Amino acid sequence: MKTRDADRLALILLLTPFVMWIGLLIVLPHAGVVLLSLREKVAPRMFEYGLGNYIAFLKEPIYLNTLMRTAVMSLLVTALALLVAFPVAFYIAKVARARSRAALLLLCLVPLWVSDLVRAFGWIVLLRETGIVSSALQALGLAAGPVELLYNDATVVVGLVYTVVLFMIVPLVSTLDGMDDSLIEAGFNLGGSRLTVLRRIVVPYAMPGIVSGSIIVFMLTAGSYLTPVLLGGKTSMWFTEQIYDQFITRFNWESGAAFGVSLLVFTSLVVWIGLRLTGQQLATTVARR
Amino acid sequence: MKRHLFILAATTALSVVSVALPAGAETLRLLTWGGYASDEVIKAFEKEYSDIKVEVTLSNNEEMIAKLRATGGSGFDLAQPGFNRIKAAHVEFDIYKPLDLSKIETGRFDPIMFNRVVASTSIDGKVYAVPHLWGTSGIMVDKTKAPDLKDWLDLCDPKYKGRTSMRLARTILVGSAFAMGEDPYAAYGDLKKYQEIMSKVADRLIACKDNVKAYWRGGDDLSAMMLSGEAVASDTWDSTAYKIFAQNKNIVYVPPKSGAVGWIDSFALPRKGRADDAAYKWINFVTRPEIAALMGAKTGAVTAVKGGIDVMPADKKEAIKAAFTDADIANIKWAAVIQPGVEDIEGKTLERIKAATAK
């Protein structure tokens, strides 16, 4: 009897920080934002409840275009991040010796020790017209005049891939780590080519890592602010920028909140569609042990 | 969005903590611009009033209002928004309290500046702000590379294709409108008219988009672009231009032919401020001529006390006198009081410009 009470107490104590975290910092603010998004301003200091903010959002092509742009570019970033991260993860998990593995993973972590902002400024210093890359190209005779590499969509994609690639590597390493080498050997012994082994054995095995990595990366990218804003050019709008503008420069919290909820719903929808199309389920991938 | 929520949550948590702290010595919590409360000034103030501790939060017009709105006007004891942003923000969000002018040494202020601010920030016969520092926005050119730029829309001169910059904000909208012969400030009261003007401005600036290298966002951005020579002209705050002038004498501030846009940053008391007396002491302290001179040196903005330009340090005074003739000063278009609804129109216009593909 006593031990059961103690167990229960331990459970409650262990759960409390988690519940408080989820409740106070995730559920409560989101509920607040949803409520805020349903308020319509009718006059100064006067509000009514209604769907006006969402209707205004759907009616304005600029907002929808920005949302689609953000989604498409985020998917591109996710795909590129997967492409970059897979070989790295495979090397760390399967090829590298056990002793160097930790060091390699640590090397991937190093950029995260510097803040987002500083990293974005790093790219600016490198890529601007009078920057390091441009000067180097000129010195080597590869470019006739100064080259502007900043302020375009490609730069934004590169910057984002760089920022998020780690979040793809870590889940991939941990799934690939659990894979028995003999599976690969068996594949070769049965006459599979490298490509067949990769396609039929390695990728299916790594699927949980791929799915969870992709979800994390997609969500992080779609919700990122600094990198697209600092590296982007004259026309590159990111949806989070719209939210910021609504909240801060236009004092329209109601509409900003509606934008925020729309972004959350939309990105969740994209993830759901992605799972559907690839025939994956959260239960068999992310939650698999 | 998560990030924003988190920041919101974090700031809320912080403000809860700061409210809960017992007040030992009195604390004056200033919400102001970078450079408006330099360490030097704070030290001098704390030396004179040893029972007051000054805490500074740096911000800008939009964020000041957003912060005060988030807390219903608590968390700060003295704020310094632009004078034209006070009325609408207060009417909409109820974030300020009226000033007691008898506690302020009003005789020190330049009467023109003082009356302008008092008139624009009075609601129901109560005054909500007094002036502190003023300046203008105009254009900045590298005169060795772009000698003939004189007006806002000269930034769209195809001769300088890909070599100019601007900030997507109210200033360029209003400036362009003046350059197109309109009077946007007069139209603030008539939202339909204002929308018409802004539509025309948007068309013009969209056509101009190809000419712009990149839109700048902050003073550092702009300085880097101008000093590296990547851009040869841009719209600018005068103080930023003066700072750049100190590093490169070829880059000068030019008050646009159709009129520089003038701003005045003011003092206002947040509605739930807890240290009004300290706030009044601060106002009276920084409007002393010798302190005003210190502030002018630091910010490049002119104080709204009598003879404000004369108390500036020599190099800044030289920069101002070089840039402005008396006629230019008379031609300054002083910011008009923002009416509810104006922000929405401007916001949509800016979005349209940003989203449009360059033609």
Image: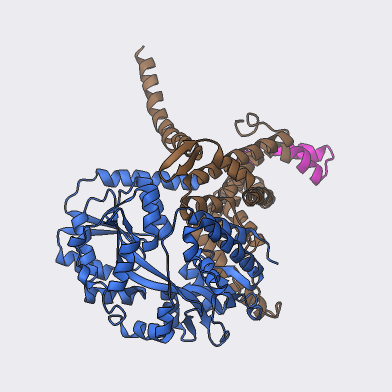
Chain colours: A brown, B blue
Q: Report the residue at 64% width, 57% height from top.
A: A157
Q: Report the residue at 39% width, 29% height from top.
A: A16
Instruction: State whether residue B220 is above or below residue B86.
Output: below
In the image, is B68 to the left or to the right of B210? left
x, y (%) of residue A239? 58, 50
Magenta region, residue range: A172-201
B246 within the magenta span: no
Q: Residue furthest top?
A: A1
x, y (%) of residue B248? 47, 84
Instruction: State whether residue B326 is above or below residue B221.
Output: below
User: Toward which corner of the image does residue A147 lie, by quadrant?
Assistant: bottom right
User: Toward which corner of the image does residue B77 lie, by quadrant?
Assistant: bottom left
Instruction: State whether residue A89 is above or below residue B300.
Output: above
Quadrant of image for the C terminus of chain B? bottom right
Q: Report the residue at 33% width, 65% height from top.
A: B117
Assign the magenta stretch its main secondary structure: helix
Q: Residue furthest right?
A: A191
Q: Nearer the viewer, residue B290 or A128?
A: B290
x, y (%) of residue B263? 40, 69
Instruction: State whether residue B289 is above or below residue B30.
Output: below
x, y (%) of residue B207? 66, 68
Q: Nearer the viewer, residue A65 or B201?
A: B201
Q: Nearer the viewer, residue A8 or A245?
A: A245
User: Toward which corner of the image does residue B309 lie, by quadrant?
Assistant: bottom left
Q: Report the residue at 68% width, 39% height from top.
A: A206
Is residue B319 at least partly visible in the picture?
no
Total labels: the figure holds 0
Q: Nearer the viewer, residue B238 or B99?
A: B99
Is residue B88 at least partly visible in the picture?
yes
A185 within the magenta span: yes
